[in-house]
Amino acid sequence: MSRIVHVNGKWLPEAAASVPVFDRGFLMADGVYEVTSVLDGRLVDFAGHMARLARSLDALGIVNPHDDAGWLALHREAVARNALVEGAVYLQVTRGSAGDRDFAYPPAGTPPTVVLFTQSKPGLADNPAARSGWKVISVPDIRWGRRDIKTVQLLYPAMAKMMAREAGADDAWFVEEGLVTEGSSNNAWIVANGRLITRALSPEILHGITRAAVMRLAAEMQMEVEERAFTIAEAQAADEALVTSATAFVMPVVAIDGVDLGSGRPGPVVTRLRAIYIEEMRRAAI
């Protein structure tokens, strides 16, 4: 069945949906996006995603075309129109089109482009990969400096994922000046001596919504969380490792650059965190 997608106020079959060729998202990656997971037909951590959307738009000087209530109505309509039970809603907002290609921003008042579509992902919560864990490789981090803005500039992360696939791995971790920044589309963590360790928030990493939820849950579990950078060698020597993201949730990492962590299987801390995270997200979804 063809998906129904939202483009600039219209609901259309995906084959009939389009944006102008001069849209700055297409020409210059001048836009931002969010991905909100859906469990049991409800939106996971929606408020967090909308807060980050507003922050990203503000950082780029793009007008936010809706308030949170308006975005919620659109997301819920997308879920309903596509009978989505488990999956994600993808939202992209660009600076729009002034009718030609130009480095200069369009005139004030140019409406932003809004695209919204769903992705059905049955088994999102019961992902077999969570039982076996991911293998990751490390790659140099050569992205721009404002990684905290969730822009649609995803070429290098896509290249990193392909590097991982070609190496027989599941994902890649970026390394800058000898330290892990984050995964290609997720935040990176290790577990050592009973402590969760993940890089502190800064312009160098995305301010993950799932990261924030795990921080909160870890505190409720009375787990110590240390916010600092770590090296690949430290990660390889850790008890466990994991990544967090809107669609991977809490995903165990069992090997880094060919070195198995522990037994090479998901450990107890990550397994428990994932179960608690999914339980809480199901309970709090709207």
Image (cartoon, rainbow, N blue to C red):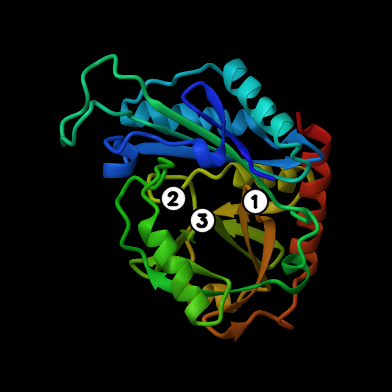
Query: Please, what secondary structure does the residue beneath circle 2 have?
Result: loop
Q: Which mark is residue 141?
A: none
Say left or right for 212 vs 232.
Answer: right
| Real-space Cα separation, disc 1 to disc 3, in angstroms | 10 Å
Front residue of this view, candidates 83 and 227: 83
Q: Residues within 10 Å of mark 1 (few under 14, many from 20)?
A: many
Front residue of this view, candidates 230 and 275: 275
Q: Position of residue 62 (x, y in %)?
A: 35, 25
| Callout 1 amino acid | Thr
Q: Earlier in the sequence, mark 2 or mark 1?
A: 2
Residue indicated by mark 1: 247
Seen as rendered, the residue at the extreme front is 16
Q: Earlier in the sequence, mark 1 or mark 3?
A: 3
Front residue of this view, candidates 208 and 236: 208
Residue at position x 55%, y 45% from top? 208
Residue indicated by mark 3: 185
Residue at position x 61%, y 24% from top? 74
Q: Earlier in the sequence, mark 3 or mark 2?
A: 3
Residue indicated by mark 2: 205
